[in-house]
Amino acid sequence: MQDSNPRRRVRSPSGYPGYPNRPCLPEMPPLLEEGGRIGRFMARSLPCVPMGCSACCRETTMPLTKAEASLLARRTGLSVEDFTWRNNDILTLLNNEETRACVFLLTSSSDVSADGMCSVYEVRPQGCRTYPNVLNHEDKAILDEGCPHRHRFPEPSDDDAVVLLNLEERLLHEE
């Protein structure tokens, strides 16, 4: 019988080729290509995605916290300056000049109703995660009139307003 302490093992346990590396996992579908596993997750999570809608990613002025920008930089290998600009001293996602869409939207068209898929969906900024919930002038969460599928989303709650107000506070007070 072999000792269960991995540092004392003499041979690789069966099913662990190249031990001490991780076990062999079943082959996973690609992340984004041809509706890979992220594409399937996205389709289940938002009512607009199955329709191929990416209107919210077009001509966006999505603000980012410094932490979100750092995470996106680590995940994409880009420098923060490659995908942001300063809008009244707040980091903001850049839009692609040709498609007029967020630089992370996989699309080749500038048409607002064209299909597109987020290439950073798992680490997208909080503003993207909460959309189409936005704050009105009275600091109440409402569904953005610019969202063509807003009628498919639940009405925002007071908790949604708190999340947005906290995000706004973080954005305004970062140095």
Image (spheres, rainbow, N blue to C red):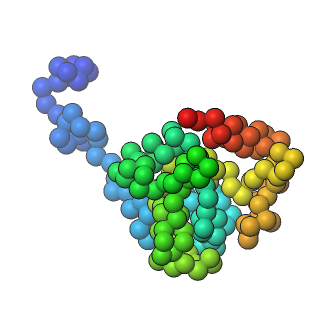
Which residue is found at the position 64% from the left and 70% from the top? Answer: 55
Which residue is found at the position 38% from the left and 50% from the top? Answer: 79
Which residue is found at the position 48% from the left and 61% from the top? Answer: 104
Please, which residue is most extreme toward the left here? 10
Q: Report if residue 126 is visible in the image.
A: yes
Residue 82 is left or right of residue 170, and the answer is left
Please, which residue is most extreme toward the right here? 138
Residue 4 in percent (x, y) is at: 26, 21
Look at the picture and state if 107 lies above or below 42: below
Residue 42 in percent (x, y) is at: 57, 60
Residue 139 is left or right of residue 16, and the answer is right
The answer to which quarter of the image holds residue 6 is top left
Please, which residue is most extreme toward the front here? 88
Q: Which of 129 and 9 is in front in this view?
A: 129
Which quarter of the figure is the N terminus placed in? top left
Q: Report if residue 35 is visible in the image.
A: no
Q: Which of 100 and 151 is in front in this view?
A: 100
The mark total stands at 0
Look at the picture and state if 2 lies above or below 158: above
Which residue is found at the position 68% from the left and 50% from the top? Answer: 130
Q: Nearer the viewer, residue 24 or 92?
A: 92
Residue 91 is left or right of residue 71, and the answer is right
Q: Nearer the viewer, residue 111 or 37?
A: 111
Residue 97 in percent (x, y) is at: 48, 71
Residue 10 in percent (x, y) is at: 12, 26
Which quarter of the figure is the C terminus placed in? top right
